[in-house]
């Protein structure tokens, strides 16, 4: 298991032995990540590496099924006997999970009663994307199949295909926050996030230098 997908290795809020962890006594559900779609994909896509590094350049199928995994967890939560007595819920995600937490927030919010206080913590997801990436991912029949997964009735998400690299995250987050005005939202990131810089550089490279196709994903 990768370090990032091992709750016992991640630390932070998942370290129940830390005395200063305010969530150490909470019940938690951890959704691992290996689908390359920020937890919003529901599509299988064939890619080929033009450099021949990945799979010797031969076509390879990527199952972008992060949304399906999320919905399976949501379904499990819906059948929890303690759901209607839940006082507080924190939807949290880091890196790709930060976007999944934000864009799937409404679907978790809808399964809890009005008395439940639901908040969001988004870590290391500052919306650093290129226009080409955004247009590819959120276009109809795109590689992730987002036209079938996004909660497009929610402000912020309903116009996601019209956003550009400068206003994507601001418009997305602001729309969702204003709709769920009783919830609290927090966003944190380091000043120089090496992972976000890495993926931004990959997105900026032309196809002949990149390890992903123009219509691919990270």
Image: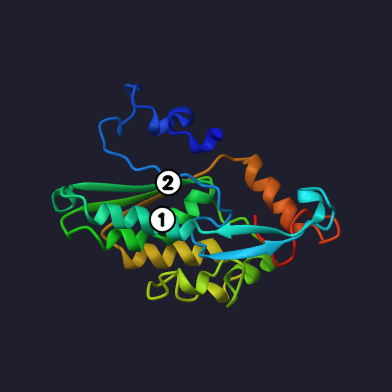
Residue at x-position 81% and y-position 50%:
56
Task: Give the SS element for disc 2.
Answer: loop
Q: How crowded is mark 1: few (under 14 residues within 10 Å), some or many (20 or more)?
A: many
Answer yes or no: is residue 166 visible.
no
Q: In the rendering, which numbered label is found on residue 8?
A: none
Closer to the camera, 70 or 158? 70
Q: Do the residues labelled 1 and 2 touch (CB within 8 Å)?
A: yes
Residue 127: x, y in percent? Answer: 57, 56
Residue at x-position 16% and y-position 47%:
82
Q: Quadrant of residue 173?
A: bottom left
Q: How crowded is mark 2: few (under 14 residues within 10 Å), some or many (20 or more)?
A: some
Task: Give the SS element for disc 1.
Answer: helix
Q: In which quarter of the image is residue 102?
A: bottom left
Locate residue 214 relative to residue 7 in the image: left or right.
right
Closer to the camera, 62 or 198? 62
Residue at x-position 56% and y-position 59%:
64
Q: In which quarter of the image is residue 103?
A: bottom left
Residue at x-position 42% and y-position 74%:
152
Residue 27: x, y in percent? Answer: 27, 38
Locate residue 79 relative to residue 100 in the image: left or right.
left
Residue 180: x, y in percent? Answer: 31, 63
Q: How many marks?
A: 2
Asked which colour scheme the image uses, the reply is: rainbow
Q: Distance between the residues labelled 1 and 2?
A: 7 Å
Position of 95 relative to 23 (above/below):
below
Disc nearer the start of the sequence (1/2): 2
Residue 211: x, y in percent? Answer: 77, 53
Q: In the rendering, which numbered label is found on residue 70?
A: 1
In the rendered view of the protein, which quadrant contains the N terminus?
top right
Where is mark 2, residue-wise?
A: 31
In the rendered view of the protein, which quadrant contains the C terminus?
bottom right
Answer yes or no: is residue 188 visible.
yes
């Amino acid at each position: 298991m990768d370090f990032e997908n091992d709750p016992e290795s991640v630390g932070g809020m998942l370290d129940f032995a830390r005395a200063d962890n305010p969530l150490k006594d909470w019940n938690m559900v951890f959704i691992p990540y290996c689908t390359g779609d920020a937890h919003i994909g529901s599509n299988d896509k064939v890619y080929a590496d033009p450099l021949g590094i990945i799979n010797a350049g031969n076509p390879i199928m990527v199952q972008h099924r992060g949304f399906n995994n999320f919905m399976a967890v949501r379904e499990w939560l819906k059948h929890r006997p303690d759901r209607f007595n839940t006082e507080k819920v924190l939807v949290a995600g880091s890196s790709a999970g930060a976007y999944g937490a934000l864009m799937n927030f409404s679907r978790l919010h809808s399964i809890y009663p009005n008395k439940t206080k639901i908040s969001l913590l988004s870590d290391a997801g500052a919306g650093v994307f290129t226009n080409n990436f955004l247009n590819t991912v959120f276009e109809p029949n795109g590689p992730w199949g987002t036209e079938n997964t996004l909660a497009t009735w929610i402000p912020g998400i309903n116009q996601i295909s019209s956003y550009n690299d400068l206003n994507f995250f601001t418009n997305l987050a602001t729309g969702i926050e204003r709709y769920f005005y009783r919830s609290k939202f927090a966003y944190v990131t380091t000043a120089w996030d090496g992972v976000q810089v890495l993926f931004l550089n990959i997105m900026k490279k032309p196809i002949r230098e990149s390890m992903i196709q123009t219509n691919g994903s990270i």
